[in-house]
Amino acid sequence: MAPAKTLDYLSQEKTLESSFVRDESERPKVSYNDFSNEIPIISLAGIDDVDGRRAEICNKIVEACENWGIFQVIDHGVDSNLISEMTRFAKGFFDLPAEEKLRFDMSGGKKGGFIVSSHLQGEAVKDWRELVTYFSYPIKQRDYSRWPDKPEGWKAVTEQYSEKLMSLACKLLEVLSEAMGLEKEALTKACVDMDQKVVVNYYPKCPEPDLTLGLKRHTDPGTITLLLQDQVGGLQATKDNGNTWITVQPVEGAFVVNLGDHGHYLSNGRFKNADHQAVVNSNYSRLSIATFQNPAPDATVYPLKIRDGEKSVLEEPITFAEMYRRKMSKDLEIARMKKMAKEKEVRDSEKAKEKEVRDSEKAKLETKPLNEILA
Ligand code: OGA
Ligand code: NI
């Protein structure tokens, strides 16, 4: 079968197309709507009030970063009308006919646009999602030709949304810098000229959600991610290498904040890079908008502070581009091993079937009277 260009058709099927079927070890262990309240919900009201709530809020953020690398923020100051407009437009894009979405097809390696599953290559199994992505910072590098132009008016809303989220992200990085005993700007400065990328994830209803993932387990590579999700549920996190999972409770108007690998390295491992995935379901489609703040490609990745008695989590300073390249090649290697293991499994089971047939024919022969065999 030709690769699916959108999931419209596949989501109407009774069974899941085999290219989305995950190995048993990777399948969801917890349901999309079995919500946990383990991830703290932190109100940022009063965060600038140095003589007031600031210290208390900062402590909560730092604790969450040390524990999970994930928390949710409310009272964050991003206007709720802007959030609902952004969501409305994003939904509107995925409701467009397939050919409209495919005007922004990025499968040829284009920087930004629409794609099914993932823009990363070499994956053995596909993710059950569609996405549209665009690069919003640095502003001078914006390529508006790769930003969707429909629904009309989305671009202006996106520009505003990107700006507000960039300042919220920087505000959170200030808190973490201070917690490390550094000047407020330490983490943003380490990003040099901060990149921002917006990924709108759309997870259609899925015929057999227990066999697949919307987005496979990963850590975000960058510094800090702000995720806006709808009320359906599906974002999951693990702290024990994928043995147990929790589903993050959706909170209207909140952002889920995730630390990425860059944030983890800069803090010398003190802050966790959230280990997470997204599951899907057969009742509802789901939408999430992830805004990634990343360092510039040539920014140096190395702990900003190594506490007494600690060893650096990195042997040597590397650029963010190099850090990303190593991560990808490791992921590709894992994907390659999994693919080979799967192919071997198929070959072994075919061989076993052939042997079964041969054995049963042999058994039949052995029980037949000699005159029938010779006839
Ligand atoms: C991501 C991500 C989770 C979700 O886009 O990196 O982790 O719930 N998304 O969509
Ligand atoms: Ni992620």
Image (cartoon, rainbow, N blue to C red):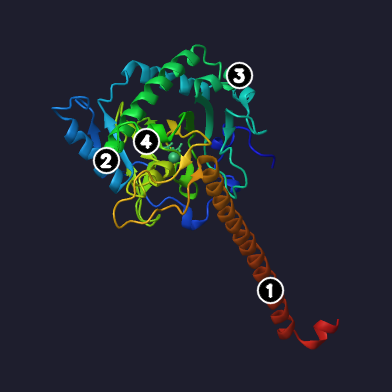
Nearer-N-terminus badge (3/2): 3
Q: Is residue 253 left or right of residue 28?
A: left
Nearer-N-terminus badge (1/4): 4
Nearer-N-terminus badge (3/1): 3
Q: Select label 4 or label 3 by which is in front.
A: 4
Residue found at x 63% / y 33%: 5
How far apart marks 3 and 1 lie (CA) works out to: 58 Å
Above or below 329: residue 349: below
Q: On the image, numbered disc 2 is attached to which residue? A: 181
Question: What label does residue 329 carry, if any?
Answer: none
The residue type indicated by label 1 comes to Lys
How far apart marks 4 and 3 lie (CA) works out to: 31 Å
Question: What label does residue 145 carry, if any?
Answer: 3
How far apart marks 3 and 2 lie (CA) works out to: 43 Å
Q: Select label 3 or label 1 by which is in front.
A: 3
Quadrant in which the C terminus appears: bottom right
Above or below 104: residue 234: below
How far apart marks 2 and 4 lie (CA) works out to: 11 Å
Q: Select label 2 or label 1 by which is in front.
A: 2
The residue type indicated by label 3 comes to Ser
The image shows residue 341 at horizontal and vertical percentages of 60, 61
Question: What label does residue 187 carry, if any?
Answer: 4
How far apart marks 2 and 1 lie (CA) works out to: 67 Å
Secondary structure under tag 1 reads: helix
Neighbour tally class for label 4: few under 14, some 14-19, many 20 plus, Cα within 10 Å: many
Q: Nearer the viewer, residue 147 or 142?
A: 142
Q: Nearer the viewer, residue 314 or 353?
A: 314
Secondary structure under tag 3 reads: helix
Quadrant in which the N terminus appears: top right
